[in-house]
């Protein structure tokens, strides 16, 4: 568990509370950092949500890339 504590920036855990902060009328949310650039159709993300739902997964996260290269 200690490895996970350092895997994400402090603001990353805030995303886990979005369901509590948003109205119940929203089923899905795409949270994107300001330094993200889409090179394809954003609609593919929604398709990924549908795949996750079929597979019984509720959350998808990636670790922060803190390598300055």
Image (spheres, grey):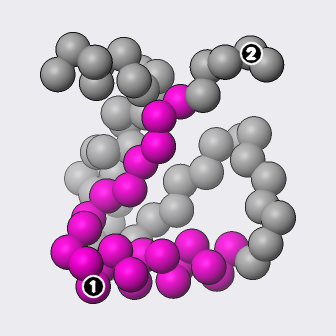
Q: Which residues are magenta?
A: 42-64
Say few, some or many: other residues with alpha carbon within 10 Å of mark 2 (under 14 / 14 to 19 / 20 or more): few
Residue 18 location in percent, x, y? 34, 51
Q: Residue at x 32, y 66 (%)?
A: 23
Residue 47 location in percent, x, y? 51, 83
Does residue 5 appear to the left or right of 63 in the view shown?
left
Q: CA distance from mark 1 to mark 2?
A: 37 Å
Label located before the other in sequence (1 or 2): 1
Q: Which residue is mark 2?
A: 68
Q: Which element type, helix, strand or loop, lies under badge 1?
A: helix
Q: Report the quarter where the N terminus lies.
A: top left
Q: Which residue is mark 1?
A: 54
Q: Residue at x 66, y 18 (%)?
A: 67
Q: Report the quarter where the C terminus lies.
A: top right
Residue 26 location in percent, x, y? 36, 74
Q: Quadrant of residue 45?
A: bottom right
Does residue 44 appear to the left or right of 62 in the view shown?
right
Up-down relation of residue 19 to residue 33 (above or below): below
Q: Which element type, helix, strand or loop, lies under badge 2?
A: loop
Pick the front one: 17 or 56: 56
- Residue 45 sits inside the magenta stretch: yes
Q: Residue at x 47, y 34 (%)?
A: 63
- Residue 15 sits inside the magenta stretch: no
Q: Quadrant of residue 14?
A: top left
Residue 41 location in percent, x, y? 75, 78
Say few, some or many: other residues with alpha carbon within 10 Å of mark 1 (under 14 / 14 to 19 / 20 or more): few
């Amino acid at each position: 568990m200690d490895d996970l504590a350092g895997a994400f920036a402090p603001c990353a855990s805030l995303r886990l509370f979005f369901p509590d902060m948003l109205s119940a009328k929203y089923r899905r949310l795409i949270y994107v950092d300001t330094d993200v650039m889409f090179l394809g159709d954003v609609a593919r993300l929604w398709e990924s949500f549908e795949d996750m739902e079929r597979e019984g997964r509720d959350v998808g996260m990636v670790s922060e890339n803190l390598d300055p290269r």
